[in-house]
Amino acid sequence: MTVDLADRLLPAFNTTSGLPHPRVNLKRGMQKHLKDQVDTCTACSGTMILEMAALSRLTGNKIYEETAKKAMDFLWAQRNLGSDLVGTVLNVENGNWVRRESGIGAGIDSYFEYSLKAYILFGEEDYLYRFNKHYEAVMRYVNKGPMFIDVHMHKPNVASRPYMDSLLAFWPGMQVLMGDLKSAIEIHEMLFQVVQKYKFLPEAFTHDFQIHWAQHPIRPEFIESTYIIYRATKDPHYLEVAEHVMESIEKYTKVKCGYAGIKDLRTMEHEDRLDSFVLAETFKYLYLIFADNNELPFDPDSYVLTTEAHFLPLSMGDKFDPSQQLPRRVVIDPDEIMAEEISRKYISACPNVASQYRTSVELTHFGTTIRSSVKKLLGNVFDARKAGQDETCQKTNERLRAWAFSTTNTDHLSQLKSMGIEVQVDSEGRVMLIHRASAIDDGGPPVACFLESDDPTATIITKFSQNFFFKIWNTSNQAALTAATVILVMFCLWIVLLFSSIILVCAVSVIFKFLKWGPFKVSSDSIILDSASEVKESADEEEDDESSKSGSSRSTSTSSSTTKSTILRNRVHWKKN
């Protein structure tokens, strides 16, 4: 049955790029109206490698894995080479991006998930390399503290929308699998604060944590990340989080004949629907969190869960004789790490999140410290909203940018010093930044400024004005720099207009004189002289003719007289002119 289904899906991949059409009729294949649908999302075309590759390895038919891998390769090639980000929607025929918004939520989410899980399951380094490049780009451009702000893939410093969607809740789980536990705890705590405020995670919420889209279809992403973090840390806090979610489901979504999604979290009105992922994922993750290992028929850490929470064994990726290898685990229980003899019996498919905090007790303390700081930060935002303040975030110093940095500016140097960065200038005038973690200032909120790359809006004139005023007055006043830039721009424009006017006037004068004089009037004197000489030569010729042809007829004499008269008239006419 699985092979039959895969064979019916393959015609959708028959495109120029290798990306599949968004829909295919399983009975009639790719009909014309389906072929006309050429726009698909990144997640739609990049979330099949696990299932298709698993089928190829189980059946020995490579066509399924090769087809899915071609789509993954094409998506990787279409990333923005400057930012390493991908967009949301692209054309399956020409590969052009239709929507270039980039983030970790709807339209992209499971592409990132499968890039990492393909490495975990099959051990192929290419997938890990790609995920790491994407991860670095996301954490550089999209991640802002505990929040994620979508940006344009080709302009990653420009935000593309003012809200976050609930699908990004899968990200903390991926961070645990790749070893970034601190950031995973921060983002998960941010999401949990939103859950506590609205009972559930809204489909979308703004950057100041107000509801943007109030629907909640009992999605699994948040509880999925809760499960993965708990498996890695054994922190009882995540059991409490799961309990909170389960109680909310029982209280607000349970209806007479089952469960129903929430249409509006502000009124708790129900929808007349229950999506399949509620049973396949949400309830499954809740069960796995509360179940002890001895209550399960298998070790869950020996399997990779697909984006639909289906189990695929890690042994599927063994390239050699399994008897010659150690068993593979997604994560190793932090309590087992203390017993080296036990930990040596396994190969962890993911980085060891307990390498610095070797016991579950230490991990719990580590998580508590991080969560308290995030809770305090978001508490200030929530309190400001309740008080009706327009400014919901604490005011911070103006962000320091690389193009505005000056080694003679004491404010800039103090900001770098508070971050543990020491500035040194060598004999050739080159600036070196040396970071020492021990030099970071203790106490107070973290510094909210950082060095960025060149400002894309900074022109040559802007940079000149900034450098000029830095050197003359050693000022960091942005208003003064802006005013100076405007003055310089206006002066340059005035100079350009002045020279353009002069050139235009000269060109018009030359053209006017040319049209007035004409091509023959320029040398009228020479024309008069030439006409006189021609008259003289004609007269001499006539005299010679008269002497040599004395017997010529009267008609010839008359013709000569006429010629003389014509020449004389021409001479008089040219002289008058």
Image (cartoon, rainbow, N blue to C red):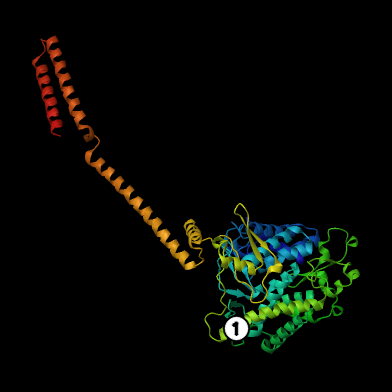
Q: Nearer the viewer, residue 131 or 300?
A: 131
Q: What quarter of the picture does the N terminus occupy?
A: bottom right
Residue 216 visible, this orientation: no
Task: Give percent across and percent down for residue 567.
Answer: 14, 25
Residue receiving disc 1: 382
Q: Nearer the viewer, residue 191 or 270?
A: 191
Q: Nearer the viewer, residue 278 or 153?
A: 153
Task: Tell me the residue at 88%/64% (across/down).
Answer: 326
Q: Quadrant of residue 54?
A: bottom right
Q: Quadrant of residue 218?
A: bottom right
Task: Give percent across and percent down for residue 500.
Answer: 35, 51
Q: Quadrant of residue 315?
A: bottom right
Whether 72 is drawn above or below 507: the answer is: below
Task: Give percent across and percent down for residue 226.
Answer: 73, 77
Task: Give percent across and percent down for residue 560.
Answer: 12, 19
Whether 390 is drawn above or below 338: the answer is: below
Task: Tell me the residue at 22%/39% (across/down).
Answer: 517
Task: Tell me the residue at 53%/85% (across/down).
Answer: 388
Residue 231 visible, this orientation: yes
At label 1, the amino acid type is Phe
| Kind of element beneath mark 1 | helix
